[in-house]
Amino acid sequence: MNRQRVITTLAVACFLILGGCNGKNPIGPGDQELADTGMLLPSLDAAIPDVPLPLGFHLVESRSRHVAAGDSRMIDYLYKGRANKFSVARFYRQYMPNSRWQLVTDRFAQGSYILIFRKGSEECLLTVNGAGSWISPTYISVQVIWTSSHVAAPMEPALPSDGKPAAP
């Protein structure tokens, strides 16, 4: 009798413990549906206030820079994460308009997404490459440039053509 009670208690305990484990990690209330669809959510601590950042991406400080003078700014940031590059491009198409950025160019070529947005006298060039895995993470290059004629001056690219950061 005592042995059956112990087995029953263990079975119930295992059921209760494992019942809440479904392998998913929702961010907050209501976010489970978005996580299930593969959609990315915005991070609350983006380094550039008006350029959203997908949750799970982190600034590569050794490859990032910015300069501000008066009302103008030049930002060249590199972020690293593990999301699928197609999901990242979809994220920017969805969330950039919330900060009044208008999509000007949307191009996929040779394994990289290039998205150009415009807001006032600034252009934001986003380049997304990589596989999004532990071996080959996804890199997001964000360049915000002030332009008086809406023609962005070329900047030194944050990523080489193969999508991997140069060795220091």
Image: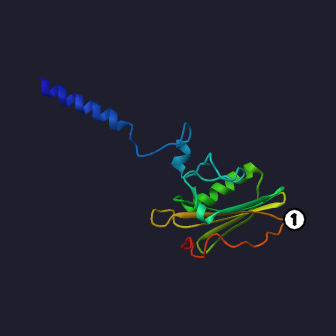
Query: Which percent across, then down, holds residue 87?
Result: 58, 58
Q: Is residue 128 above or below residue 6?
A: below
Identity of the residue drawn at 56% across and 55% down? 57
Q: Residue furthest right?
A: 149
Give residue 82's position: percent from left, percent from top: 51, 59
User: Which image quarter: residue 16?
Assistant: top left
- Left or right of residue 125, residue 60 in this image: left
Quadrant in which the C terminus appears: bottom right
Identify whether 30 is placed above or below 115: above
Q: Is residue 53 above or below residue 123?
A: above
- Residue at 41% of width from left, 46% of height from top? 23
Within 10 Å of disc 1 (Cα), the crowding (few <14, some 14-19, many 20+) is few
Residue 141 lies in quadrant: bottom right
Q: Residue at x 74, y 52 (%)?
A: 97
Q: Report helix, strand or loop for mark 1.
A: loop
Please give the residue where the numbered disc 1 appears in the rendered image. Answer: 148
